[in-house]
Image (cartoon, rainbow, N blue to C red):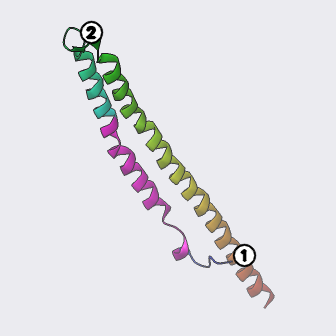
Amino acid sequence: MAITSESQLIDVQTIYSGCNAFVSALEIFINGGNKIIEAGNTCSSKAISIDGKSLQPDIVEVGQQVGNLYNEFVNYAQAVSDQATQIYNQQVAELNEYRRQQAEQQNNG
């Protein structure tokens, strides 16, 4: 048993705050993706084409891919939060067991 005081517990609230700040910063992917899609929609075959082919679908697809990065990175942040919760709960259980054993020793001693 390694956890014997609350000071040894991971700071799960700071981890959550960091993950939330990370997710908020990720909104740049949504905004950037939307701007690329908007640019793609502007680039119709009337506006620009190469060898008679519009770049619109390719540009819109890139915008969607950039936007999809948001979801991927949000999932990473959620995984970190979930792992922190799991570790914290294990540590609290370890601390509670240590305290139970200490109380038992005092009652028997």
Closest to the observer, 62 or 106:
62
| Other-residue count near label 1 (Cα within 10 Å), few / some / many at <14 / 14–19 / ≥20 | few
Farthest-out residue, front: 51
Residues rendered magenta in the picture: 7-29
The residue singled out by tag 2 in the image is: 52
- For the N terminus, the image quarter is bottom right
Q: Main secondary structure of the magenta part?
A: helix
Q: CA distance from mark 2 to mark 1?
A: 77 Å
Residue located 38% across and 49% down the image: 22
Residue located 30% across and 39% down the image: 28
Closest to the observer, 107 or 66:
66
x%, y% of residue 34?
30, 27
Callout 2, which amino acid? Gly
Residue located 29% across and 12% down the image: 53
Q: Is residue 97 left or right of residue 67?
A: right
Farthest-out residue, bottom: 109
Q: For residue 46, what is the image quadrant? A: top left
x%, y% of residue 84?
54, 58
Residue located 23% across and 16% down the image: 43
Callout 1, which amino acid? Arg
